[in-house]
Image (cartoon, grey):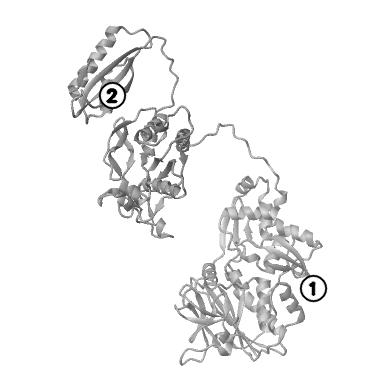
C-alpha cells in the first residue's frame, strides 16, 4: 500500500523524520518496504499482513501510529446535508445470499454535474497509485484509501426497475452459470455459480467487490448517482478475482476483510466529498437503504494480566495494559480480568492471545527485554518409537542397504501387477476421494508395490544392482465410516550384486539370493528383538513356490520373504531375479526384549557333539532344530546346522541333516555322562516326533 506521508501527518501530527516514521511503523508490524519521492511529497510503500485489512487505509495506519506515539489520532465524523425524497423511495436492495454479502448499504445523490475533481484530490490519488477519472469516481476512491471501505458508483438512471415497478432494484446474488458481463475495463467475462454479482432485474451490472460493469457506469451525462457500500465474504471475492484473473484495489481490500460496521460512514464521507467536488449544490436523498439482516456484533474478550505478563516476560500493571489497548480504540473495563470490547474493524482479534500481542505492540516490541531460554537439567532422548525406528535404520544401513522413502499413495492398477487372486485382502484398498492425480488415487495395502517400483526405476536408469529398505505404513480398510488400520512395515528388496570388490567374498556369494535375504531378515530380527527368527514354507501369490518363507518369533508371525515370480517381474520390466521381504514393524516393536545385558563368559570348557539323521525331505530343518533345543536341557548352549544332503546313499524322498551341538555350564565342568544323557534325550525326541533315522 502506498502511503503519502503528509496525508498521514494530518491524522497524527508529529515531528518525525521520514526514516524515523518508517522505523516506528515497521516496529508496530507495518513493514515499510520502500521510501519514494513523488510530486507533492514523500510516499511510503508499506506491507500489510493478510489479517490486518483495517490497515489498508489512512485511518487504520493513523491509529497504529498514534498508538506507537501514545497520542490521539485526529478523526471526525462526516457531515451530510440531506434533502429531497427518502433514499428508500429511490432504490430497493435485495440480498439473495446474506452469507456472501452480510451487508449492503446505498445512498442516492442527485443534481450531480460530472467534471474533474480538485487538483489536490487528483494529486493524492496519483501518489496512492490510482488514476484520477472524474469527481464522483475520485471521491469514492479517496474514501476507499482514507477509510478502507471500497465504494462503487452506479448511474442511478441506468439501474432498471422490476416489471410494473417504478423504483430501481439492486439484487445481490450468485451469478448464473454462463452469464456474461462487460466490465468497465471493456473486458467481457463469463461467470460461474461461485461468483457474486450485483444485478438489477435485467441481469448483472457489477462483479461484487471487484469491478463494475459498463451498463451502469458513471459517464459525462450522469446526473443521479447510486452509491454502493457493502461488506462481502472475503473468500468469495478472492475466488472470483482469481478465477477471472482480475485484481483491483477494491478486491485486494475485500479479500482481507473490510469493516462491516463502516459502510454508512463511508457513504456519508463520499457524499460529503461529492458535494465539495461538484459545481453547484447537489441533493443527497434522505437516509440510507441498509440491508443488514444479521448485524455483526462487537466481540467481547477477557484478558488475564498475569497470563499476558508471563507470556511476554513483562511486569505491566492492569492499568498500563488497559491504557495501551484503549490507544488502539478498544473499549476496556478494568478489573482483576480485563474485559475488552473489540470494534468491528478489528476482525483479527478473536482470542485472548490476540490481545496479548496487542499489549506487546502497544508497549513496544523494542522495550521487551531479551532473556535466554532456561536450560533443562534433564537428559534428552528420542521417544521410544522413534528410537526403535532409528535402530532399525542403523541395522539396515550396516548391512549395506540404502533407505528408500516412498509414497503411501499408488494407482488403482498397482496391486493388479502383483498377480493377486480376486479374493486376496490386499486388493481391498482405501480409495482417496479427492485424489489430485490418477497415479496417486488409493492407499497401498503392501510395501511390495513400492519396493518393486523403486527397483524398476533404478533399472530404467541403468542401475541393475539394488539393495534397499523402506519404513512405511500400509493401510487396511475396516468397516464403512471407520478409519483404516495403519500398521507400520519394513520392506527389503535386493537384486543383482550385493557388494563388489571385497577380497574375502567369493564372486558367486556376492549376489542376492534367497539365503542372502534370509540372512538380512535374521540379522534385523536378532538386532531389534534379541530373539532368533523362525522360518517356515510360505505360499505367497507374488513369490516363487519353494523360494518363499514365513518368518515368525516364538510362533507369532512377523512377515514373509522370498523371490518374486517371473510374471510379476514382467509387469515391472525386471529381467533379473528380485528378492523381497516385508515385516510387520509394529510386531517387531512389540516383541522387542529388554536391552542386552552383559553376562560373563564361562571359564569352564565346552563339550561339542555332532548329530546326523535322515528325515523326510519335506521336514523343515528349523523344526528339527527346535526339537533339539527343547529336549537338550539348560546346558545346551548353541545348535547350528552344518550339513544338509540329498542323494545316494540317502533314500529318495529323504535328506540327511547334521547339527553341531555345544554344551557348557557357568559354574563347573560338565561330565561326559551328563552330555551323553542330553544327547540320548535329543535322539529319542527326533525319532518319536520326526521319524528320524540316526546316522552313525
Looking at marks 1 and 2 on the same chain, the residue that comes earlier in the sequence is marked by 1
In the rendered structure, the answer to whether residue 109 lies left or right of residue 688 reads: right
SS class, disc 2: helix
Q: Is the N terminus in the top left, top right, bottom left or bottom right quadrant?
A: bottom right
Tell me where residue 612 appears, x and y as whole percent: 25, 19
Q: Nearer the viewer, mark 1 or mark 2?
A: 2
- In this figure, which residue is indicated by the disc labeled 2? 625
Is residue 371 shown to the viewer in this render?
A: yes
> Looking at the picture, does residue 674 appear above or below residue 533?
above
SS class, disc 1: loop
Give the residue displayed 42% in from the left and 46% down from the top.
455
In 3D space, how far apart are the residues under numbered discs 1 and 2 (Cα atoms)? 97 Å
**Location of residue 51 by image quarter:** bottom right
Q: Which mark is residue 491?
A: none
Tell me where residue 316 appears, x and y as whole percent: 68, 48
Give the residue displayed 78% in from the left and 66% down from the top.
13
Is residue 93 shown to the viewer in this render?
A: no
- In this figure, which residue is indicated by the disc labeled 1? 40
Categorize mark 1 by other alpha carbons within 10 Å: few (<14), some (14-19), many (20+).
few
Give the residue displayed 56% in from the left and 82% down from the top.
213
Categorize mark 2 by other alpha carbons within 10 Å: few (<14), some (14-19), many (20+).
some
Amino acid at each position: 500500500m502506498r502511503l503519502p506521508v503528509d496525508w498521514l501527518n494530518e491524522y497524527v501530527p508529529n515531528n518525525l523524520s521520514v526514516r524515523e516514521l518508517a522505523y516506528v511503523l515497521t516496529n508496530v508490524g507495518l513493514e515499510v518496504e520502500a521510501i519514494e519521492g513523488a510530486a507533492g511529497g514523500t510516499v511510503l510503500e508499506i506491507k500489510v499482513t493478510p489479517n490486518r485489512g483495517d490497515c489498508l487505509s489512512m485511518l487504520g495506519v493513523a491509529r497504529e501510529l498514534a498508538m506507537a506515539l501514545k497520542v490521539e489520532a485526529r478523526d471526525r465524523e462526516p457531515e451530510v446535508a440531506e434533502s429531497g425524497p427518502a433514499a428508500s423511495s429511490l432504490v430497493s436492495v435485495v440480498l439473495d445470499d446474506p452469507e456472501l454479502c452480510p451487508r449492503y448499504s446505498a445512498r442516492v445523490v442527485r443534481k450531480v454535474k460530472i467534471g474533474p475533481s480538485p487538483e489536490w484530490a487528483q494529486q493524492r490519488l496519483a501518489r496512492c497509485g490510482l488514476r484520477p477519472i472524474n469527481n464522483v469516481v475520485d471521491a469514492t476512491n479517496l474514501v476507499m484509501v482514507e477509510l478502507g471501505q471500497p465504494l462503487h458508483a452506479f448511474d442511478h438512471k441506468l439501474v432498471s426497475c422490476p416489471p410494473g415497478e417504478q423504483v430501481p432494484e439492486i439484487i445481490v446474488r450468485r451469478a448464473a452459470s454462463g452469464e456474461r458481463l462487460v466490465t468497465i475495463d471493456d473486458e467481457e467475462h463469463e461467470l460461474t455459480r461461485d461468483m457474486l454479482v450485483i444485478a438489477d432485474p435485467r441481469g448483472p451490472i457489477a462483479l461484487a467487490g471487484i469491478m463494475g460493469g459498463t451498463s451502469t457506469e458513471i459517464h459525462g451525462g450522469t446526473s443521479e448517482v447510486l452509491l454502493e457500500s457493502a461488506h462481502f465474504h472475503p473468500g468469495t471475492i478472492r475466488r472470483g478475482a482469481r478465477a477471472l484473473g482480475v485484481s483491483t484495489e477494491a478486491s485486494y481490500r475485500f479479500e482481507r476483510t473490510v469493516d462491516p460496521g463502516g459502510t454508512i460512514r463511508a457513504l456519508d464521507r463520499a457524499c460529503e466529498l461529492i458535494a465539495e467536488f461538484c459545481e453547484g449544490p447537489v441533493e443527497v436523498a434522505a437516509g440510507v437503504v441498509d440491508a443488514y439482516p444479521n448485524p455483526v456484533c462487537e466481540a467481547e474478550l477477557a484478558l488475564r494480566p498475569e497470563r499476558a505478563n508471563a507470556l511476554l516476560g513483562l511486569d505491566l500493571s492492569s492499568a498500563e495494559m488497559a491504557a495501551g489497548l484503549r490507544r488502539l480504540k478498544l473499549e476496556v473495563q478494568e478489573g482483576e480480568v480485563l474485559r475488552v470490547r473489540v470494534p468491528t474493524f478489528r476482525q483479527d482479534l478473536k482470542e485472548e492471545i490476540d490481545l496479548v500481542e496487542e499489549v506487546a505492540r502497544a508497549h513496544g516490541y523494542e522495550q521487551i527485554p531479551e532473556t535466554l531460554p532456561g536450560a533443562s537439567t534433564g537428559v534428552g532422548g528420542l521417544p521410544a518409537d522413534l528410537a526403535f525406528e532409528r535402530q532399525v535404520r542403523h541395522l539396515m544401513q550396516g548391512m549395506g542397504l540404502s533407505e528408500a522413502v516412498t509414497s503411501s499413495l499408488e494407482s488403482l492398477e498397482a496391486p493388479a501387477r502383483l498377480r493377486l487372486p480376486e479374493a486376496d485382502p490386499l486388493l481391498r484398498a482405501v480409495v482417496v476421494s479427492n485424489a489430485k492425480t490418477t497415479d496417486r488415487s488409493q492407499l497401498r495395502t503392501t510395501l511390495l508395490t513400492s519396493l518393486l517400483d523403486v527397483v524398476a526405476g533404478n533399472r530404467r536408469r541403468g542401475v541393475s544392482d539394488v539393495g534397499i529398505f523402506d519404513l512405511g505404513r500400509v493401510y487396511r480398510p475396516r468397516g464403512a465410516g471407520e478409519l483404516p488400520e495403519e500398521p507400520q512395515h519394513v520392506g527389503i528388496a535386493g537384486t543383482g550384486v550385493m557388494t563388489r570388490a571385497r577380497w574375502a567374498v567369493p564372486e558367486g556369494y556376492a549376489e542376492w539370493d534367497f539365503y542372502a535375504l534370509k540372512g538380512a531378515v535374521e540379522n534385523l530380527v536378532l538386532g531389534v528383538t534379541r530373539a532368533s527368527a523362525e522360518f517356515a514354507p510360505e505360499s505367497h501369490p507374488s513369490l516363487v513356490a519353494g523360494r518363499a518363507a514365513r518368518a515368525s518369533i516364538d510362533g507369532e508371525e512377523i512377515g514373509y520373504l522370498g523371490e518374486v515370480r517371473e510374471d510379476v517381474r514382467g509387469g515391472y520390466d525386471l529381467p533379473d531375479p528380485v528378492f523381497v521381504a516385508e515385516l510387520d514393524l509394529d510386531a517387531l516393536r512389540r516383541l522387542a526384549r529388554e536391552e542386552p545385558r552383559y553376562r560373563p563368559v564361562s571359564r569352564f570348557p565346552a563339550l561339542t557333539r555332532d548329530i546326523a539323521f535322515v528325515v523326510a525331505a519335506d521336514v523343515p530343518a528349523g523344526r528339527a532344530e527346535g526339537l533339539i533345543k527343547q529336549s537338550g536341557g539348560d546346558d545346551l548352549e548353541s545348535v547350528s546346522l552344518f550339513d544338509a544332503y540329498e542323494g545316494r546313499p540317502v533314500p529318495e524322498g529323504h535328506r540327511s541333516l547334521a547339527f553341531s551341538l555345544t554344551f557348557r555350564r557357568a559354574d563347573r565342568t560338565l561330565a561326559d555322562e551328563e552330555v551323553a544323557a542330553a544327547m540320548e534325550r535329543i535322539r529319542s525326541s527326533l525319532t518319536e516326533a520326526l521319524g528320524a533315522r540316526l546316522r552313525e
